Image: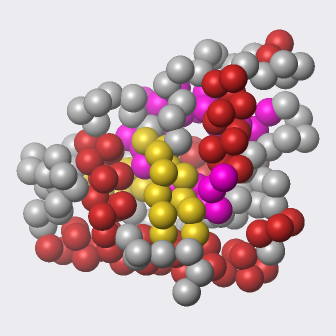
Amino acid sequence: MTTFKVGYFVGSLSTNSINRLLATALVKLAPHNLQFTEIPYKDLPLYNSDFDADYPPVGRALKDAIAASDAVLFVTPEYNRSIPGGLKNAIDWASRPWGTNSFRRKPSATIGTSPGAIGTAIAQQHLRSLLSFCNSPQMNAIEAYIQFKPGLITNTGEVTDPSVEEFLRNYVTEFYAFIERVYMAIPRETIG
């Protein structure tokens, strides 16, 4: 089986983020042929086109991290019925300047957790819209809106509810299969 490198974004910048716990669990539950690396973005300034002529090192590092990944996973909370501003800013940086969109033809998936009953459904729909514009093939099923309850995921990424653990294991297994299908249709050497 082919090994794929997955760069992942945690939408919350909080060190105590429940979405960071979810990301830790997903990494633990993933098939061994998915290699995960978090893509940092907290030090990015607010994007504006003045940077296009000379991207700062932090902007180039973001684009390099995405380029080094075969696929991208977004693990995000929902803020005010959308994705956090920092994550939107990172997407803006990665998709610019015009003609250098880092997400073009890069397989992606979204998932998130929230204490609310609908998880992060609306934020994920907004994120899917952004990724569609960025021409990123997306795993649209299975959808994953996880309602977080205290103790659901430990600090080391252990999932305490067996049905949620099974669902998350299936999610990352399906993500692997999706990445493989995308690269059957779009060879990796044509991406970038």
Left or right? Give the position of 153 relative to 63: left
Q: What is the span of residues highlighted in magenta in the rendered image?
A: 68-96
Say if residue 43 shows up in the picture.
yes
Rendered location of residue 65, percent (x, y): 63, 44
Q: Residue at x 48, y 51 (%)?
A: 37
Rendered location of residue 9, percent (x, y): 49, 44
Residue closest to the far bottom: 1
Rendered location of residue 135, percent (x, y): 77, 55
Magenta stretch: includes residue 39: no
Q: Residue at x 72, y 76 (%)?
A: 183
Compare residues 151 and 115 and report the one nearer the observer. Answer: 151
Say if residue 130 shows up in the picture.
no
Residue closest to the far top: 50
Q: Is residue 10 above or below residue 5?
A: above
For the C terminus, the image quarter is bottom right
Q: Residue at x 83, y 67 (%)?
A: 189
Question: How many circles with numbers are drawn on the protein?
Answer: 0
Q: Is residue 97 above or below residue 124?
A: above
Q: Residue at x 61, y 15 (%)?
A: 45
Q: Is residue 185 above or below residue 38?
A: below
Q: Quadrant location of residue 52?
A: top right
Rendered location of residue 34, percent (x, y): 48, 69
Compare residues 160 and 77 and report the one nearer the observer. Answer: 160
Compare residues 33 and 161 and report the one nearer the observer. Answer: 33
Q: Is residue 20 above or below residue 22?
A: above
Left or right? Give the position of 137 relative to 71: right
Magenta stretch: includes residue 76: yes
For the N terminus, the image quarter is bottom right
